[in-house]
Amino acid sequence: MKIVTHLRQWGMLCLACALSGCGTQLKTAGTTDERVLFVEDADPALAALPFVEDELLIQHYPGAEGEVLADLYSEVGATVVEELPEIEMTVLEVPQDRFQPIAESLAETGLIESVQKSYLYEPGEIPDDPMFSQQTHLAQIRAAEAWDVTVGAEDLIIAIVDTGVDRDHPDLEDRIVGGWNMFDRDSDYSDVHGHGTLVAGVAAAVSDNGTGVAGVTWDCPLLAIRTTDEYGRSSSRKLAAAILWAVAHDARVINVSFAPLWSDRVVRAAAQEAFNRGRLVVISAGNGGGTTTARGYKAALFVGAVSSSDRIASFSDRGPFVDLVAPGIGVRSTMLGGGYGAANGTSFAAPIVSGVAALAWSINQDLRPVTIESAVLDTCVDLGTTGKDNVYGHGAIDAAAAVGQAAETSFVPDTTSPSLQISRPANGTIISDRFTAWVTATDQWGVADVVLSIDGMPHATDTRAPYRFVINTASFSAGSHELSFVATDLAGNASQAKTVTVTFRRSLRSTGGSPSRITFNSPSDGAVVSGNVSIRASVSDSDGLATAEWLVDGTTVFVSPISGESTGVSYVWRTASTSSGRHTVTLIITDARGGQTSAQLDLIVQ
């Protein structure tokens, strides 16, 4: 495995990224895709990480033909080494001297949703403090009161995605029910570093046995999944694969004590798949002590660390992505080799939350992940600024209150269908070449999938937001076709079909047409904006212009007719009701032949 390490520092990058945007911006004529190449590098924490320099992680759009993708990978000189079909991810091995050109070529095809590096993550430092003799974190989270209600269910599994676990430790050997070595692809999940054994003991060390330490749960079994090399270093690819393996082997709570994962799309996709399958992923916030604008993702809980006096730990990372905090200083647990010690870090705050989630779930295993999330977050002890904030999230975990809320929550069958809206194409649109359809789907408990049918026949399924589908119009006859979309939630409720009628035209390439030219005049890409923002662009097409369609974050907000071969277009974006952070504005130009060209502009709302 070849590694490249960035020497840039997070602090040096923050201002530059905020003003100009990081990563590679693609504005490719003739495509309708959002920026897909190394978008995670817009986050300075990820941009500074080392990565595997001969490996690309590809997620293609639903509807992209397998044969076309295989030919594409072969043409650019990439070799498929692994498939993760649950998240439509393909792992490609590429020549290291062509890493960037191959990535750019793939991103420009319009078939690829994201091209990501396989970032490398390391567990936090582990202070050696074997003399620490009290587990103050258990009293701090009111574990004893929670244990009065439940000590965990013997069939509710917690997965430890980490450096492995010491299977011979006296406080863990009777708790481990199996595992896997994702790094070497064998069954030896022995701990090669020590980090995973500490994490496992925090969540579920054997308790009430007169020796050692007590876990947050007493009876919940552990699934040990090693994802690291001997130095404790894992990657985006291995972490995602480990989460999916845990799902396939019936883990209900999946602990991932690596960081910074808040912007990693591949891990997010795996967490979303886990959530859709009735699991909950818990992730450590990170020990860099910095602040990010990243918002994380709803399918996982991100956990920061506090001291014994409920003050934020100096090392705990902060930002909108933080959901809650738990004790992370002097957390006493099991150590590699059979001993005990204490450690600091969000890595050990996360398994406290994993343990509490498992306790709450043990009360009623019919509850959904979103209900367990609510039980954990709604009962947090508010710290810092009133309400959710970027330091403490919703506040400090309270095991007794979370278990109490779960005990009082009844399972209510979900009979409400998801809501569904088609963002593009509009009814009556003329499309050609490969076209990307966009829809939005929401549901209180979660959307399982969205299915696109063409003329009544299923064409593609997307299991994660944002919902995008590639349609190769050349595979269909020219003329009128019906596109129909149906969303299904996690309880199996299906929405009413939303349908548009469109016209497939012959490819512009076969008729001699050329893409439109789009140039954004103001504001500049990556600009920080507020209030009413006037977005202006110049557009031209030798075949003549027909319409200009503006979208914000994939949703159509304004469509206007245009004419001639060259003109200026504009849209006033009122940002008062828009959340702060990065947003994508897309301009789609339809020419007189029915061909479409798009360009994107990333803006940061202050």
Image (cartoon, rainbow, N blue to C red):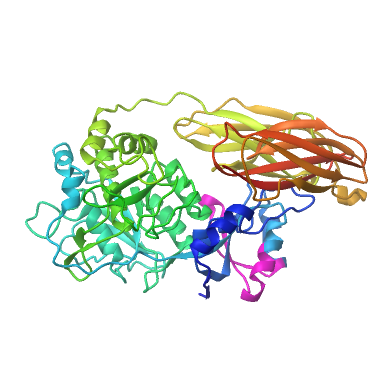
Front residue of 41 and 500:
41
Q: For this rendering, which residue is in front, 524 or 172?
A: 524
Q: Nearer the viewer, residue 183 or 97?
A: 97
Residue 220 or residue 477, whichever sits in front: 220
In the displayed structure, 269 sits above or below 363; it is: below
Above or below for 461 versus 133: above
Using residue 124 as the reference point, say whether residue 84 is left or right of it.
right
Quadrant into which the C terminus falls: top right
Q: Is residue 523 left or right of residue 467?
A: right
Q: Residue at x 24, y 42 (%)?
A: 359
Q: Position of residue 357 (x, y in %)?
A: 29, 43
| Residue 221 coordinates in the image, percent (x, y) | 24, 52
Of all residues, the one furthest to the left in this rendering is 210
Residue 499 visible to the viewer? yes
484 part of magenta stretch: no
Q: Quadrant of residue 348?
A: bottom left
- Left or right of 96 on screen, residue 253: left
Q: Which of the 4 quarters of the picture holds residue 163?
A: bottom left
Q: Height in image: 287 above or below 376?
A: below
User: Where residue 261 sits: x, y (%)?
Assistant: 45, 55
Magenta-span inclusion, residue 88: yes
* Residue 58 in view, yes or no: no
Label tally: 0
The reply, left or right, for residue 395 in relation to residue 489 is left
The residue that appears at 35% across and 58% down in the rendered structure is: 315
- The location of residue 566, given as percent across then percent down, is 90, 42
Residue range highlighted in magenta: 76-103
The image quadrant of residue 343 is bottom left
